Image: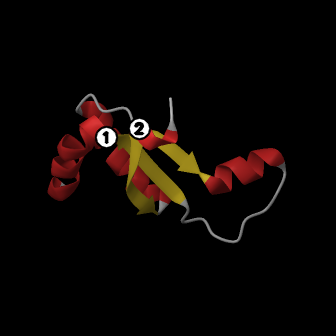
């Protein structure tokens, strides 16, 4: 799949990300999650910020995802 098929709907803290991911999955939307801190940790590098969680969804799921986010 191409990156062009996804759109970022959130960037922020781990706590908020977990809540958003849970709500999306409860509504049959399975997002792509990019966690720069965890990726760096697993690779043995350090990062300066913990708030680098990014959540992406397919373009065709965007409206449904926006509706879910607005209710949170």
Q: Residues within 10 Å of mark 2 (few under 14, many from 20)?
A: few
Horizontal arrangement in the rendering, residue 46 relative to residue 11 (left or right): right
CB under 8 Å between discs 2 and 1: yes
Q: Residues within 10 Å of mark 1 (few under 14, many from 20)?
A: few
- Which color mode does the image show? secondary structure
Horizontal arrangement in the rendering, residue 28 relative to residue 43 (left or right): left
Residue named by callout 1: 59
Residue 3 placed where, x, y %?
Answer: 50, 41
> Is tag 2's residue or tag 1's residue first in the polypeptide sequence?
2
Query: Any mark on residue 46, and which?
Result: none
Whether residue 55 is situated above or below residue 61 in the rendered picture = below
Residue named by callout 2: 5
Whether residue 28 is situated above or below residue 58 in the rendered picture = above
| Between 58 and 25, the one nearer to me in the picture | 58
Q: Where is residue 23, by image quadrant?
A: top left
The image quadrant where one finds the C terminus is bottom left
Residue at 34%, 49% (x, y): give it. 19
Looking at the rendered structure, the secondary structure element under dot 1 is helix
Residue at 55%, 62% (x, y): give it. 52
Looking at the rendered structure, the secondary structure element under dot 2 is helix
Horizontal arrangement in the rendering, residue 36 relative to residue 3 (left or right): right
Residue 29 placed where, x, y %?
Answer: 30, 33
Residue at 76%, 45% (x, y): give it. 42
Q: What is the distance, in whole Å, between disc 2 and disc 1 at their CAs?
A: 6 Å
| Between 1 and 38, the one nearer to me in the picture | 1
């Amino acid at each position: 799949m191409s990156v062009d098929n996804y759109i970022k709907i959130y960037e922020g803290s781990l706590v908020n990300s977990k809540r958003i991911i849970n709500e999306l999955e409860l509504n049959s939307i399975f997002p792509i999650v990019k966690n720069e801190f965890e990726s760096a940790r697993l690779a043995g590098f350090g990062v300066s910020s913990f708030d680098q969680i990014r959540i992406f969804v397919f373009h065709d799921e965007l409206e449904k995802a926006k509706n879910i986010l607005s209710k949170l």
